[in-house]
Amino acid sequence: MEYKALITGLGNPGPEYVKTRHNIGFMTVDALAEMAISRKSMRFKKIEISGDYELFSICISGINVLVTKPLTYMNLSGKAVSSICGRYSIPIQNVVVIHDELDLPTGRMKFKKGGGNNGHRGLESIQDKMNSADFYRIRIGIGRPEFSSQVKDYVLEEFDSTDLNIAAEMSIAAIKGLNLYFRRGQGPATQFMNSFIPDAVKSEP
């Protein structure tokens, strides 16, 4: 089977990281898997689990796509992406990376192609291994702590109950954005994701 793209959700493996801010990419891939299992039309299938990644195939808007969760910890995410892209002949331009973003507030996200890594070690690793930054990113906001010295601990903290609900809404919205991207292209997907505001945020006083 020929696959047209690779969706990569970034995070850290292990139960201690499941609900942490840094794992919003994993959360989104898990939500996508649950949705696909309930919809037979999406033809979800687990392909492989190795030491470096979990790999699945899925049909989104009639397009066969690979989905992965790197298991190498965040700093080595590029190892999995590089291996999968090489094995399945997927160009960097057809990679979509879902990750946490400090420079966006909780409850906002942006869809873009290319750019820097803003100190995000997962993005940095992918850029280094692929020798390119020319991939799509779904940047899901987690906000930024008051001091830069707090960032390392902040991203590895668990969402509180309110922000966890917001994160769940963001994951579902990111999946809707992916459907738009594969069905209608970058423009409509960008418009939807960049303007999305979760109900939990709208209801705040």
Image: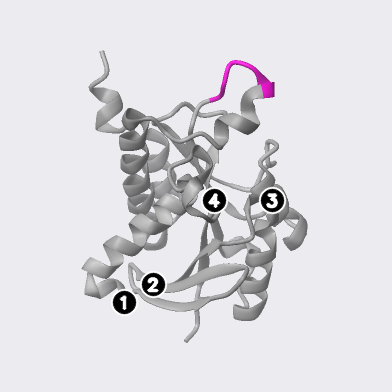
User: Of marks 3 and 4, which one's residue comes earlier in the chain?
Assistant: 4
Amino acid type shown at disc 4: Gly
60 relative to 174, above or below: below
As measured in the structure, the alpha-carbon distance from the residue carrying label 4 to the one carrying label 2 is 20 Å
Residue shown at the point (64%, 17%) measured from the top left:
147
Q: Residues within 10 Å of mark 3 (few under 14, many from 20)?
A: some
Q: Badge 3 is on which residue?
A: 75
- Count of numbered marks: 4
Q: Quadrant of residue 134?
A: bottom right
Which image quadrant: the C terminus? top left
- Residue at disc 4, secondary structure: loop
| Rendering coords of residue 17 (x, y %) | 50, 46
Q: Position of residue 201 (x, y in %)?
A: 30, 25
Magenta residues (range): 144-149
Which residue is the site of mark 4?
Answer: 11
Q: Earlier in the sequence, mark 3 or mark 2?
A: 2
